[in-house]
Image (cartoon, rainbow, N blue to C red):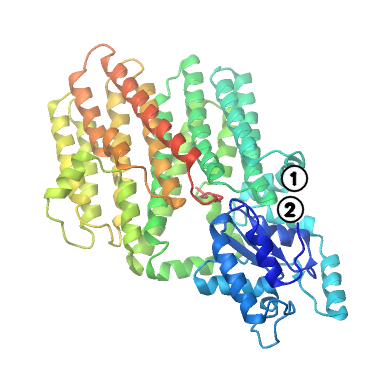
Amino acid sequence: MQTAADAGDAATLLAAVPAGRRVALVDPRFVGHVHALRLGLTDPRFAAATVPGALTAQPEARGALLRALRRTTAAVGAGAPVVAPDTDPAPEDRTVPGRIAVALEAEGTAVKRPELGSLTAAVPTDAAARATAESARDAVDDEAVRLRSAVKAHDGFFTTFAISPYSRYIARWCARRGLTPNQVTTASLITALVAAGAAATGTRGGYIAAGILLLVSFVLDCTDGQLARYSLQYSTMGAWLDATFDRAKEYAYYAGLAIGAVRGGDDVWVLALGAMVLQACRHVVDFSFNEANHDAVANTSPTAALSDKLDSVGWTVWARRMIVLPIGERWAMIAVLTALTTPRIVFYALLVGCSLAACYTTAGRLLRSLTRRASRTDRAAQALADLADSGPLAQGVAAVAPGLRGAFTAPAVALLGTLVMIGGALFLPYGSPLTVAAAAVYVVLSGLAVARPLKGALDWLVPPFFRAAEYVTILVLAARSDVPHAVPAAFGLVSAVAYHHYDTVYRIRGGTGAPPQWLVRTIGGHEGRTALVAVLAAVLTHASGFTTALTALAVAVALVVLVESIRFWVSSSAPAVHDEGELA
């Protein structure tokens, strides 16, 4: 830390700091809470940020900061007092940091101004003002505020009342010992994998241990985010690990339950895969709807207004958060039922609960879309196209086919293709060449659905329809094959493909764009993989060939997507983020 005599001296000192380092300007008269300074000066998610009396800039904003500082110096004079004339619009903009923040914004550099709430941050100009600021600072315990703000503002009932009251203190304990959110996230994953191993024993003791360990894993899962907020340790990789590990933990636990059930003489692999397919399709509905609408113009809807009105009634808020079966309620239900009942009952409860939640959330999104007057952007259309995961076959059809007009044409064509594909897998004789013909029809309809930009009111349904077609087709063909271990192999294949789809979502959310086209082409796109599985089912109708083929495909897809994904996230230059997560 260095002290500048005036604004001109500050510019000289800043220019001497190595280019790759964050810098901060703090008025020496600053009075406030330490956590107010943390919020303004240490959050890695923003290129520039300010609180009254302090300003910070990341390396990418250093050039703009120096230019703004030099302009400010030229305007007020190198030896001018820190306080500008009282004609300035706001008191916080009368200090050098405040004036520079305004200059940065005028140049086009976004400056984050974090909400301080009850925290104090001020630059008093006389003794009376200083006494007032110090009194306000001393009246509020900033550590208590820091602990409260570590908890996510909008969370499920179970998480809010059964986990967060104590997990925030675990987060503080971790922070004081130098542990990082990523380390806690990894501990949560390991705990969940041990829980899956306990469930795989198929014994009552194993099931009880599994339920307890799953809850411990969830506590750690809450703690990692609270630790990130408490210590402001946000990162691109942290958000990716938190999101992808949640899926890995849940699906590994499903597999553990299925293995344990088989050991007890009850094969529930179909139910396990069905639960995974349903959960993944629920998520893609959420992701697709949000991407289609979050930057839409004139984005209003009477249904949304009613939803906001219901949120003003306390009990409806919790009822609506619980009915979607968010991760806290879902994991609590799984843990309790695992300890007390059987894997079959666990999966029945999951399928029923998630189905009701999916109907509720999807119906609400449909009503909002149909009653909304919105113009969707090119960015939203591109995001939906990326989420669709169209491979070379569908892209080839889209390139030569005329775009189908009509407000609801794209989702209608996608739905028709989905029904043809799933219907063929369900009702045609297993191994029939007609199933391959159904896959060919699905390829053509998939291409037609994405031949035009997805800007229609219901075009966000296209990616969920494609996910349902692919995942359910794999499930049905494996279940109907009567080939030993075909369904567990299908579970592995859907897991690998689902990882790719979740990875696409997190890249789009992080502002880095979808995975590269070579990756999508290499793994075939949704229509290519679906057609390939249909061909394999028709050709490999004897012995264990179908299982071997599904396993090989699962391994190939997993290797390609994991290697590229890990390479991307480890080397990503995307800005630091923190994924608050979806309730579902």
Splitting the image into 4 quarters, where does residue 24 fall?
bottom right
* Front-lying residue, 245 or 392: 392
Relative image position of residue 86 (x, y in whole percent): 70, 87
Point 26% across, 35% down: residue: 524
Q: Which mark is residue 390?
A: none
Image quarter of residue 101: bottom right
Give the class, few, some or many, for how many residues have Cα within 10 Å of label 2's Cα (few <14, many ≥20): some
Q: Give the answer, above or below, for where 201 lies relative to 132.
A: above
| Secondary element at tag 2 | helix
Which residue is the extreme one toward the bottom? 87
Residue at position x 61%, y 38% in the image: 182
Q: What SS does tag 1 mark?
A: helix
User: Mark 1 = which residue?
Assistant: 172
Position of residue 169 relative to residue 42, above or below, is above
Q: Residue at x 13, y 30 (%)?
A: 434
Q: Is residue 115 visible?
A: no
Answer with left or right where residue 232 lies relative to residue 520. right
Where residue 250 appears, as percent x and y from the top left, is 51, 34
Residue 451 seen from this side: yes
How far from the left and from the top, in percent, is residue 512? 42, 50
**For the residue marked with disc 2, what is the amino acid?**
Leu
Is tag 1's residue or tag 2's residue first in the polypeptide sequence? 2
Q: Quadrant of residue 90?
A: bottom right
> What whole-number distance in Å separates the C-alpha atoms at marks 1 and 2?
8 Å
Is the Cβ of the residue at disc 1 closer than 8 Å to that at disc 2?
Answer: yes
Q: Residue at x 54, y 43 (%)?
A: 327
Name the residue carrying label 2: 147
